[in-house]
Image (cartoon, grey):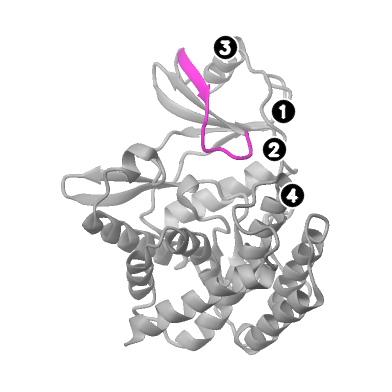
């Protein structure tokens, strides 16, 4: 279930202070002082809870059976195989007696989101470069968790489950599915479909030859990690929300950050991130081809979402291929420049 994409969720609903105190009592976490919904939790599943024993995050009303167990699996393993701060201990209460649904309670990590206004407004160029570097190093650590198959965690068996049709077919069919879905909200022409198929076919060999699957967070973006400024140094002080995690091509995790840099005109930071991330990488040409496919996937998702909710910020008459292709061209340019 990890690799299913969710655009809506079971939100927490109304929660009373009495229920929160019951939860705190259940885990010996002190007396409730305050609680509030999180601002960056797009799925509406999380709440900050401040008690006499510390600060915590409540995550509940799972989107699918096994969601919390999956996330606990990823949190525990990342904690063991890296120096990355994750919300551990990640405690699950399977009982529905308090809230009417199962939940997890975990420590609240220190730091702020990179896209918080008070952080973004204070960053100078040196800060931005340093943050691009620590993002690259954090992703490298996440991707050091290597496995033998491309697939996902199965909470029923507590084992990894390979994609039945193979990684290439799974990914390409996923892209085709979301392109077809976008037709519900926008015009997708024959030329658009042909362009997408050309991108996929051009990268097919690079995916077919890919044989080093790693952990992929699947949703690495400013809303899911925290930064902290200590002395003269920036660090990533926490990474969380592993609902979309799976095992496959790690370059998929670069896409949302690179998109942010491209959209903000911060190509220097994008180049620095890629230079650090790819420093010890072979087969840069194959990585570039795979990265463009992951970018294509994200562009199609973003296009369909914006069209569906009326949040289009570009010319309504622009074709999806015309809108998305510049991102792929920019990726080529970024990687060519760091190779010089």
Mark 3 Cα shell of 10 Å, populated few (<14), some (14-19), many (≥20): few
Which contiguous range is marked in magenta? 32-44
Mark 2 Cα shell of 10 Å, populated few (<14), some (14-19), many (≥20): some
Name the secondary structure under disc 3.
helix
Residue at (26%, 59%) from the top-left corner? Answer: 130
As measured in the structure, the alpha-carbon distance from the residue carrying label 1 to the one carrying label 4 is 30 Å
Q: Earlier in the sequence, mark 1 or mark 3?
A: 3
Q: Are marks 2 and 1 in contact (CB under 8 Å)?
A: yes
Whether residue 257 is situated above or below residue 76 in the rendered picture:
below
Q: Are marks 1 and 3 in contact (CB under 8 Å)?
A: no
As measured in the structure, the alpha-carbon distance from the residue carrying label 2 to the one carrying label 3 is 21 Å
Q: Earlier in the sequence, mark 2 or mark 3?
A: 3
Q: Earlier in the sequence, mark 4 or mark 3?
A: 3
Q: Which mark is residue 17?
A: 3
Q: Earlier in the sequence, mark 1 or mark 4?
A: 1
As measured in the structure, the alpha-carbon distance from the residue carrying label 1 to the one carrying label 3 is 16 Å
Mark 1 Cα shell of 10 Å, populated few (<14), some (14-19), many (≥20): some
Q: Earlier in the sequence, mark 2 or mark 1?
A: 2
Name the secondary structure under disc 2.
loop
Task: Quickly name the residue at label 2.
Answer: 62
Q: Are marks 4 and 3 in contact (CB under 8 Å)?
A: no
As measured in the structure, the alpha-carbon distance from the residue carrying label 2 to the one carrying label 1 is 8 Å
Task: Quickly name the residue at label 4.
Answer: 308
Q: Earlier in the sequence, mark 4 or mark 2?
A: 2
Task: Quickly name the residue at label 1.
Answer: 101
Residue at (71%, 20%) from the top-left corner? Answer: 97
- Residue 18: image x %, image y %? 59, 10
Whether residue 267 is situated above or below residue 135 in the rendered picture:
below
């Amino acid at each position: 279930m990890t690799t299913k994409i969710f655009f809506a969720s079971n939100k927490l609903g109304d929660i009373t202070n009495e229920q929160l105190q019951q939860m705190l009592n259940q885990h010996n976490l002190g007396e409730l002082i305050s609680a509030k919904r999180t601002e960056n939790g797009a799925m509406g599943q999380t709440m900050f809870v401040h008690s006499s024993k510390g600060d915590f995050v409540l995550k509940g009303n799972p989107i699918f059976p096994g969601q919390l167990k999956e996330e606990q699996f990823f949190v525990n393993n990342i904690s063991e195989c890296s120096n990355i701060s994750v919300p551990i201990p990640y405690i699950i209460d399977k009982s529905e007696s308090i809230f009417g649904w199962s939940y997890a309670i975990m420590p609240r990590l220190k730091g702020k989101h990179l896209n918080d206004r008070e952080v973004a407004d204070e960053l100078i160029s040196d800060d931005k470069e340093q943050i691009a570097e620590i993002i690259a190093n954090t992703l490298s650590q996440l991707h050091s968790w290597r496995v033998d198959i491309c697939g996902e965690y199965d909470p029923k068996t507590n084992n990894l489950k390979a994609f039945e049709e193979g990684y290439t077919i799974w990914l390409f069919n996923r892209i085709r599915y979301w392109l077809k879905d976008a037709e519900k909200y926008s015009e997708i022409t024959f030329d658009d479909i042909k362009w997408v198929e050309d991108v996929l076919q051009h990268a097919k060999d690079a995916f077919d030859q890919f044989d080093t699957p790693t952990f992929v967070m699947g949703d690495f973006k400013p809303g899911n990690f925290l930064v902290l400024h200590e002395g003269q140094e920036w660090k990533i002080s926490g990474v969380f929300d592993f609902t979309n995690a799976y095992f496959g091509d790690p370059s998929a995790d670069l896409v949302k950050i690179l998109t942010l840099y491209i959209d903000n005109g911060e190509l220097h930071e994008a180049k620095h991130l890629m230079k650090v991330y790819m420093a010890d990488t072979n087969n840069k040409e194959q990585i570039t081809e795979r990265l463009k496919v992951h970018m294509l996937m994200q562009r199609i998702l973003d296009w369909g979402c914006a069209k569906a909710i009326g949040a289009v910020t570009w010319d309504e008459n622009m074709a999806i291929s015309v809108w998305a292709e510049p991102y792929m061209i920019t990726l080529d340019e970024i990687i060519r420049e760091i190779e010089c």
